[in-house]
Image: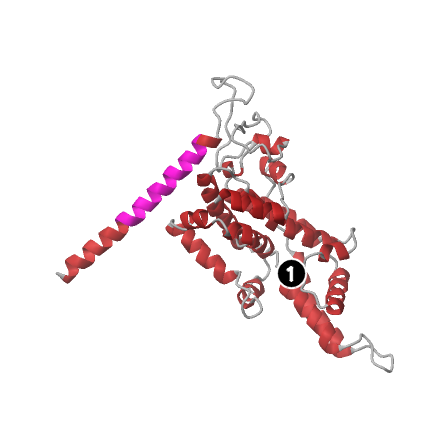
Amino acid sequence: PATAAKGWTSLILVKDVMRRVLEDRLALLEVQRKYIHDGPVQGSRSSPSARVFRPGHHFSESQSAPTFDASFADDARPETKARRAFHLLQFASSDVARQLTLIESKLFFAVPYAELIACSRLLASSDASSFAPGLEQRMPASSALGRLVATSKRLSGWVASAVVSEPDAKARVALIAFFLSVADHCHQLHNFATMMSVWGGLTSKPVRMLTKSNFAALQSASTVTLFAHLSQICSKDQDLSALRAATQAQQDVPCLPFLEPFLADLTRVHKECGPDTTPQGLLNLPKARRLASSLKRITRHQHWRYSFPPLLPVEEYLSDLLVLDFAQLLARAEACE
């Protein structure tokens, strides 16, 4: 009897998982049916030359441009060439993660160690957190580190904007699951910077206000697993210890670190070790050694490059992102639910 009961329990669990998978597939098919057009926007639906961009499908330059029915779009949502051509859910999350990795890695590789020291001095003197609001405005416009910080903040804003600006409830649910998948792919690529930016957008107040959408997205077992895993990696408990350990474990492979804990280390050195020179005018060697050690933990990741090629449709889409300000995000979130 005990064996039979255990067997029935296993069958019930399998049945429940299969039901949830089927529901996820039906939801995705509904999104595709709504957003993927069978023909050119301005022409006939039966045009034989029409091509539809579907998730995971790569277009070459010789293929005609994919088409997309943008009739669902909110009038208040700005239309651009890239946004008229595609919807984000038409791309594979792995392709978006790779393209975001290329974008941020180019900025990271261009950051010189002198800017890292200068930024840490600024933080030590202002008692601000490394990614505090307005930090990028206080840095030189031509600063590579300033551009990297601004890009990270913009990515978080884009994730939140993409979710709360979506007028269709099922598509909002699909977008939440999509961005969780993007963050997970970034983690697999050792791109901790973009992973944290995407996670920051998903856990921002406007997105958290979408309680129904978040609840629906977490009905999938795979999505729940991703959410739990990312929650652990991205946790800011114990000074980002989990993220520090994951970054430190990457040796001799391409890696894009999240700079906040490293900038915090540099800032701590400035605060604890005092001036660069002693009262006698000599170099403060203990401080110099600690700065060199902290800088090495950052700059060693600049020696390895990502080798995968860009995907032009995704690159075009990501070059023109919709980012709403915080007040607009709150207003959209309240209007959605």
Residue 34 appears in the rendering: yes
The x and y percentages for residue 164 are: 54, 44
> Which residue, given by chain and number where applicable, does mark 1 sit on?
259
Q: Nearer the viewer, residue 306 or 183?
A: 183
At 57% from the left and 30% from the top, the residue drawn is 85
- The quadrant the N terminus occupies is bottom left
How many numbered marks appear? 1
Q: Amino acid at mark 1?
A: Leu
Indicate the quadrant where residue 64 lies. top right
At 76% from the left and 60% from the top, the residue drawn is 115
**Few, some or many C-alpha atoms within 10 Å of disc 1 (few <14, some 14-19, many ≥20)?**
some
The x and y percentages for residue 157 are: 61, 48
Q: Nearer the viewer, residue 76 or 50?
A: 76
* Above or below: residue 244 compared with residue 76: below
* Above or below: residue 99 compared with residue 113: above
Indicate the quadrant where residue 254 lies. bottom right
Numbered range of the magenta stretch: 15-33
Q: Secondary structure at mark 1?
A: helix
- Asked if the magenta segment contains residue 31, the reply would be yes
- Asked if the magenta segment contains residue 21, the reply would be yes
The x and y percentages for residue 93 are: 51, 44
